[in-house]
Image (spheres, grey):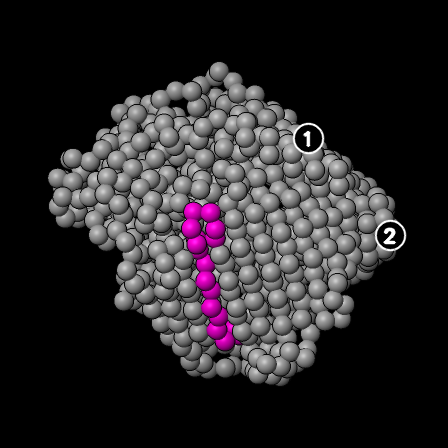
Amino acid sequence: MKKYRILIILVFYLNHSQGQINFKNYNLIIRKAVDKIKIDGELNELSWKSADVAKDFFMITPVDTEKATQFSEARVSFDEDFFYIAIIFFNNTVKGNYVIESLKRDFSFGKNDNFLVAIDPFINQTTGFAFGLNAYGAQWDGTMYDGRRVDLNWDSKWYSKVKFDEDKWICEIGIPFKSIRYNENNSIWGINFSRLDLKASEKSSWAPVPRQFPSVSLAYTGSLVWEDPPPKQVNNISLIPYGASNSTMINEKINKNNIKVGGDLKYNLTSALNLDVTLNPDFSQAEIDRQVTNLDRFELFFPERRQFFLENADLFSNFGYQTIRPFFSRRIGLNVPIIGGVRISGNLDEKWRLGLMTIQTQKDENLSLSANNFSVLSLQKKVFDRSNLNLIYVNKQELNSFDIRNFNSSYNQNIGLEFNYFSEDNFWNGKLLYLKSFDNEEFNKGSVFASHIGYQSINWNLLLQQEYISEDYFAEVGFVPRKNYFKIQAKAAYLNYTKDKTSLLSHGPSLNQTYFFDTLFENKDKLTTLQYRFNFINRSRLSISFRNQFVKLLSGFDPLRTGISELKADSEHTWNNFTISYNSKPQNRFTYSIETIAGGYYSKGKRKAILSELSYRFQPFLELNSVINYNQIKLPYPWKENSFWLLGFKANLTFTKTIFFTNLFQFNEQLGLWNFNSRFQWRYKPASDIFLVFNSNEIIFPSISTGWNLTFKINYWLNI
């Protein structure tokens, strides 16, 4: 434990040796509107003429040592109901057509000329909100966590308008105060405005941000100074009822006209703490997962897309690491419907955040599945300037009946504590994590201990991480694909920035070394990756890498996942791979990424693969996207030579900024699966939608199954 005490001391020292936070140096006064602001993209109101102006933006990329060459101006205002933002982006040095992916919501940041604003109402430099628009007015929004990450699955009700010509583009935004959470007693918020101009291959921001970080990093915001305090929030109640009609056919058995009704309620307990209630939720409108070829021994991770779980999702789902999650909401309602649930989440004050959730599922006697209750408590306290302590408790309780007083059946519980460290300048980050599991068979079960320390400067990216998971640790509501191991990982990457402003921006090597041992410290896995990458001024990228991998199988494993045969447990395998990958510049209408892999595989086998993604846009209305992956694997008898195609074709048709039609066809030869998904969405009012979704699929492995599903759904967001 001595080395972990040293890590804590080091982190504490680093935290108190940093300079002053950046937002104190850039101030923008927000004044109450003197007239009615109309969201029309025309900045002709007196309120805009008298507003403070944030200008003289700094360049982030390709260099972060100069002022932006494309000028920008930002203004803010407010009234009793709305927080207003107005931005003018001038094309004073580079003119030309704007680069737009489509009109779809939550567009890809790097493929659009766009504007983003990061808002930190609690000045904790860790959590907040991000809103954005592309040059044709498509909206982008999400909640912020870890100081620089954005969860785009969160959608809220807000209003915007964009107007443009060859000389400039203007966006005007109105965000209802009811759509965000804030401390109404704070007279200063953190804020920053950023612009990505693909015509000029330039990213810029009002308050300067080092180029190794995202432009919405909350460690690098300016300060929004309220001349008058923000309005106090009165009762904020939203009802979101829905009705859905569903018809299905599974293996030629048709279930017609399955009518379902339910809804959600949102209520602000305070201006920063929200209550969510759901009854008989329906998730049929959620986009389906993209197919992948799985050649790994462990379960794959797919993100949560269901609306009920999304607000303040970091409180529940981001505890731990991506492969050590005590709570993973996709475990809930996996095979049986959810009856209902309640969530309380948000900020108690400037230092404390709370997450509390309980969800009840039905039982299914035909599948011999009991009803289950899932409950989660998450508590987070800010420490130092940007760090936090988190506590989580997760309980899955099997119920033999709908009588919640019956606790005679099985349960699985997890309790955990973690410390997340972020330095003031964002260069240093670290984590200490401890988890303990319990169940009805053996009260004191296994445990997890993990930690890391990382450093990211303009040139260097360094990481040292360790993980320990005991054999008897269980997280039935979590995502922990591997147990009974001790892992050590070290990573070092260096980027050299050139003085060439016409072609190559930066280049450099990286080395990643990972060791896996069992809990008796016997070597199980080893992975060495050496990579060299090139980043170009036009935002295209090239990388070349070499991988050496050693695996000692923990159990029998089918290297093709097709059921032909298995490699024996404890057998040892070593091989090398070479990889070359390239991502084209996003300014072209035709864009692509391609990766080629050649080398060895399990049991002295050989693998060749081509992984590609191709896109073409008829901007702004139609985007065509295809995934074409091919794997050829040669193994000894009984597998011999096998090949797998993975094909995906997607058409995003955006008639307007409120009418979307998406069609996706997927073929996964490894599973013998084909899938067609067609999804029509009309956002007839803000946050209110009509969906018509058709899904058809056939799968051969592990068993033959065919079916289709047709759903019509309508919901309405009503503010009371």
Q: Give the range drawn in magenta.
A: 337-353
Q: Is residue 3 above or below residue 173?
A: above
- Residue under numbered circle 1: 511
Give me the residue at 39% from left, 20% from top: 66
Give the quadrant of residue 438. bottom right
User: Residue 536 appears at what percent x and percent y?
Assistant: 50, 26
Q: In this view, does 269 lie to the left or right of 596?
A: left
Is 403 placed left or right of 7 in the picture?
A: left
* Residue at image point 24% right, 31% down: 53
Q: What residue type is labelled 2?
A: Asp
How many neighbours does mark 2 have within 10 angstroms: few (below 14), some (14-19), or many (20 or more)?
few
Q: Which residue is at the front of the view, 101 or 208? A: 208
Disc 1 secondary structure class: strand
SS at circle 2: loop
Instruction: Please tell me whether residue 295 is drawn above or below residue 488 in the rendered image.
Output: below
**Mark 1 residue type:** Leu
The residue located at (61%, 66%) in the rendering is 395
Report if residue 324 lies within the magenta region: no
Residue occupied by mark 2: 570
